[in-house]
Amino acid sequence: MRSLRVAAWQYPIERVGSIAAWQDKLAAGVAHAAAAGAQLAIVPEYASMELTALLSPQAQGDLAAQLAELQPLVPTYVATYAALAREHRIAIVAGSIPERVGDEFRNRARVHGPGGEIVVVEKLQMTRFERERWGVAGGAGQTVIALGDTTIGVAICYDAEFPLIARRLAAAGAEVIAVPSCTDALAGYHRVRVACQARALENQCYVVQAPTVGVAPWSIAVDENVGAAGVYAPPDRGFPADGVVAMGALNEAAWVIAELDLDRVAQVRADGQVLGHRDWDAAGHLMGAVSTARV
């Protein structure tokens, strides 16, 4: 049986006192996931933003200043995740961080392989807050990543709400799509959760959501964090009837761990009660012009 054990972190945003304290927190978390047998650990979008507690008082109250002052921390941030992936022989979807690319900032995550490989993944579709208030721009291009004997993709938070973003990953071979998320209200969490379940249904694959949790009144970027980690599958043969493989408790710091049976993905794509993965292309003839009528 082909399988992948995944761990999704309901990551608590906290006021860290130093880079060393943050590294200790991350090390303890990854060690916990590895001890549970996880082969892939997913850390949420903008988990990095708790590092703004280490910035100057001026930057802590200014979104633009935060982006600038975070940049010197990026090399240490990346190196810390890379070292933990190598130490524990585990793949990690690292928490995303706003990073300067040319003359703009992008929301970037990295997938760290157990052998030191690093793949950069960028958020494509920006929320209003990111675009209008924070000045973070959308990325370009998508990548699927070979992990053992499966292929994974990453859709960062709002990206999961756009079917074609996930569809391109599934069409390129992804059997598992990681969705690191950061939402500041219950409605926002449910938008991403419903999107994750819809993407699992449409593409007949696993979708794994990992959110930030907790309250950080000192932060203007991640002051409120609402969510629960979830592992979703198509509600079809061999999967739970509601498509929910595993679910965390809302707003609690925790890991949600699940064993993914990858052979079931292949089976349901070949002989499910419906054939959504295949019928995406078959439905192409339906995408013509829409006529208008009056009654």
Image (cartoon, helix red, strand yellow):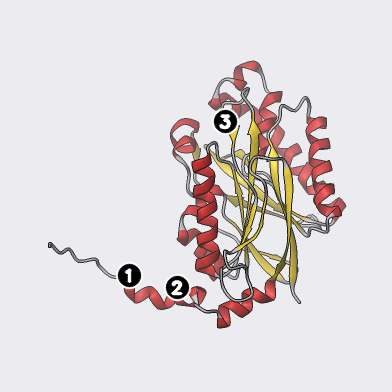
Residue 257's image quarter? Answer: bottom right
Residue 57 visible here: yes
Counting residues from the N terminus, which is met first, the one under dot 1 or under dot 3? 3
Q: Residue furthest bottom?
A: 271
Q: Position of residue 54 (x, y in %)?
A: 71, 24
Counting residues from the N terminus, which is met first, the one under dot 2 or under dot 3? 3
Determine whether the residue tagged by mark 1 lies in a helix, strand or loop.
loop
Q: Position of residue 246 (x, y in %)?
A: 67, 58
Q: Which residue is mark 3?
A: 221
Query: As rendered, which of 236 and 91 lies closer to the eye?
Result: 236
What is the number of the mark on residue 287? 1
Determine whether the residue tagged by mark 2 lies in a helix, strand or loop.
helix
Q: Residue furthest front?
A: 241
Q: Amino acid at mark 2?
A: Trp
Q: Position of residue 274 (x, y in %)?
A: 49, 77
Q: Is residue 89 left or right of residue 225?
A: right
Q: Amino acid at mark 3?
A: Ala
Q: Is residue 139 above or below residue 141?
A: above
Q: CA distance from mark 2 to mark 1?
A: 11 Å
Q: Quadrant of the C terminus?
A: bottom left
Q: CA distance from mark 1 to mark 3?
A: 39 Å
Q: Position of residue 134 (x, y in %)?
A: 50, 32
Q: Which residue is mark 2?
A: 280
